[in-house]
Image: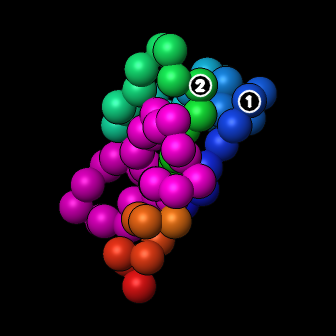
Amino acid sequence: MRAAHGADAVQERGVRLHADAWLLIRGWIPDVVRVELDDPQDPTPYWIISSRRADELAAAIAGAAD
């Protein structure tokens, strides 16, 4: 998983967005976290979550996964 800011976050929500991705985004929150999924039973490739503290959210998810 990784946090995306600025133009990179716009790309994640736009031209890089996979049609099967799960989104939890708010238009007024510019940064996002992309969480890759590895579940053969689930066709969803990743989640995109908007966050005012994207770096902290990405670190918390990564810490929980360890």
Residue 43 appears in the rendering? yes
Q: Residue at x 41, y 26 (%)?
A: 25
Question: Where is 63 relative to 8, above or below?
Answer: below
| Location of residue 61 with respect to 45 vertically, above or below | below
Q: Identify the residue shown where x is 67% and y is 24%.
A: 10
Q: Quadrant of the N terminus?
A: bottom right
Q: Quadrant of residue 26?
A: top left
The answer to whether 3 appears left or right of 66 in the picture is right
Q: Which range of residues does the magenta coloring cover?
A: 36-58
Is 32 drawn above or below residue 28 in the view shown?
Answer: below
Identify the residue shown where x is 48% and y is 14%. 27
Q: Can residue 20 be seen? A: no
Residues tagged 2 and 1 counted as in contact (Cβ below 8 A): yes
The stretch drawn in magenta includes residue 57: yes
Report the side of 22 relative to 62 (left or right).
left
Find numbered disc 2 in the image and state the secondary structure of the residue it sits on.
loop
**Tag 2: amino acid:** Pro
> For mark 1, what is the residue?
6
Q: Secondary structure at mark 1?
A: helix
Residue type at mark 1: give it: Gly
> How far across and how far down the image is residue 37, in percent?
39, 60
Q: Quadrant of residue 63?
A: bottom left
